Image (cartoon, rainbow, N blue to C red):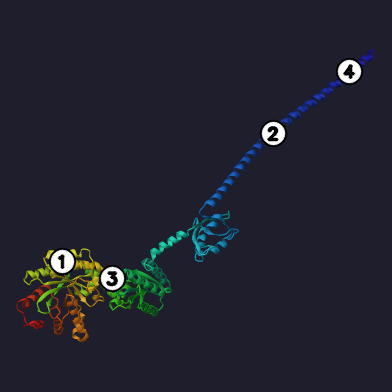
Amino acid sequence: MANGFDFGISVIIVLLILIDVYLVVRINKHKRTEALLWQQSEELKSAQSELAAQEEELRQGFHELYLNEEKIRQHEELSRLVAEGANDALWVWDMVTDALVVSERGRELLGLPEHVVNTKEKWKQLIHPEDLPHMLDKLEEHLSGCNSFYGAEYRIASPEGGYRWVLSRGKVMFDSQGQPVRMAGSYTDITERKYKEEKIKHMAYYDALTGLANRELLTETVNQALAAARQDGSQGAVLFIDIDNFKQINDTYGHSWGDKLLVNISGKLTALVYEAGMVARWGGDEIIIFLPKINKTEEFAAYADKIMRLLEKPILVNEHVFYITASVGVALYPMHGDNIDELLRNADTAMYLAKNSGKRTYMMFNKTMHEAVVEKTLMEARLRRTLEQQELRLLYQPQINANSGRVEGFEALLRWESPDYGLVAPPKFISLAEETGLIVEMGNWVLEQACRFSRQLHAGGSGWLYTAVNISVVQLMQEDFVEKVISVLAETGVPPQYLELEITESVLMERFEENIRKLEALRELGVRIALDDFGSGYSSLTYLKKLPIAALKMDKAFVDDIAVGGVDAAITGSIIELAHQMGLQVVAEGVENGDQLRYLREKKCDIIQGYIISRPLPPEAFIVWLQQHGGLLGGRQEAGHSWATYYEG
């Protein structure tokens, strides 16, 4: 029983031991499991942290991507709005593929259907052939780095026909190797601006009346031609054309007629030299023809002959036929000048010589003319000091009553006593004085001196003599001319009725109506007006009845013709008769012999003046002459004067 109890106890003990072992094993395994779970839990926590960090990173990346996509969308929207709202055409050129993209606005602006122009080469085909080289040059300047931006103005063909002007601007992009890969820019329609510029340019370079080139365009064209001529040795010609008696047409028919005539002439000349040169209006009725390529003098002569024949053809204006002529001067380059000023000056000089040689002809400039120009320049310089140096002199030539032989008056004749030229007669310097304006001061001096001399003669007992003074057109055109005459009369005390102002038709033709008004004002004061050189002009009879004159001075040519007899003498007699019928006195100047004097007395000419009576005399000699001829003034007539015999008894 005890053994069985012990066995049972032993079994229980063994079981307990086994249970303990088992429990220890389970506890240890559990601990290992717990440790593994804790380790895995820590690893899981670490993984979760990493995932959370990655999730945050992904979230931030997504947000940034979203923002970038929004920016891109906004940029594309903005680009679209800019392209659609811009007034200009936008373009992008892929220089690698030559693909050209033009904005929709650009296609609308230039009238180009979609996809018609999708390469730069096709675009160049639309550019005006004259403008393409300029566009390519500007493009090359930009691509080579000469200019920071590309810019060119050119014409591009329009689908409707014709061309439109565009301003193309842009900038190139380069790759890492420095090769151009892309270019972008804009097109601006500048057609309207170009038309306005062209209109302004036309106004600046063309004459408004005739449409001919004006001075500015002529100057630029000639200067360019001269520059080219220096390189290739070519020759050319400048023709200076002045319409003969054009002013008389204006004065007779009005400026509107003259303008139409000038337009007609300009058109004919332009058609004549259209392919060979340029026609320009220099001013008034002065026209310049420029022929840049003249190989032989014969070519110039042929053109000059054509011009002369063309101008002589009848021209119809307002149903009226005009027959005109012209005087033409020619200068060749480089023979007669290597700049436009010299060429025009020399051509102008030749033209004046042609006009003075009878008009209706042309002359080429030569060395003699040049010498005359030099002399004229020197004379002008000396002429400017005449009054200051007291070089002017007045000579007095007596005028007698053709019927009684009594001295009626005298004419004051201006002379220039130059230390360089000696005693210079008026034809040599008066025209130069008029050109320079010096004639005004000279004319005033003559008027004052002549009136003072008249006063001196009166104080010496000769009585009042008519004082005849020649008046220049430049003097008469002065605003204060009438006031000047009145002032001189007041200062010298000469009665107005003893002052005679001699004018010529050429004087009256300048501002005819205004000049007539001035002369009428002087006539109302009592001043006598005489028409000098009557018969030498072209419109004397036309204007004679309009002039406020008291006397006619026949041109010397009519007095010379008396000796010829026949028709020539009859004309002189008719002039005297005509003048008397109009209530005018007749003065015959240039009377040199007894036959002329006898004829003039027979025809009842009123006043005689000429060498048969006396040459022009200095003041002292004139006073002596009056004393010697006192018999004609109520005193004794000395013998030895042939003209006096016609009045003896």
Q: Does residue 385 appear in the picture of this structure?
A: no
Q: CA distance from mark 3 to mark 1?
A: 27 Å
Residue that mark 2 sits on: 48
Helix, strand or loop for disc 4: helix
Tag 3 near tag 1, CB within 8 Å? no
Q: CA distance from mark 1 to mark 2?
A: 130 Å
Position of residue 123 measured from the top left corner of the image (x, y, whole percent): 55, 61
Does label 3 or label 2 sit earlier along the sequence?
2
Amino acid residing under circle 3: Asp
On-image quarter of the C terminus? bottom left
Which corner quadrant of the image does residue 346 belong to? bottom left
Q: Does residue 256 appear in the picture of this structure?
A: yes
Q: Which mark is residue 525?
A: 1
Amino acid residing under circle 1: Leu
Amino acid residing under circle 4: Ile
Does label 4 or label 3 sit earlier along the sequence?
4
In the rendered view, tell whether residue 123 sits above or below residue 599: above
Q: Which mark is residue 644?
A: none
On-image quarter of the N terminus? top right
Which corner quadrant of the image does residue 585 belong to? bottom left
Position of residue 34 measured from the top left corner of the image (x, y, whole percent): 76, 27
**Is 118 displayed left or right of 565 in the figure?**
right
Does label 4 or label 2 sit earlier along the sequence?
4
Which corner quadrant of the image does residue 304 belong to? bottom left
Numbered disc in front, either 1 or 2:
1
Residue that mark 3 sits on: 251
Q: Dot 3, how many residues are within 10 Å of its Cα: few (below 14), some (14-19), or many (20+)? A: some
Position of residue 293 measured from the top left corner of the image (x, y, whole percent): 41, 74
Residue that mark 4 sits on: 12
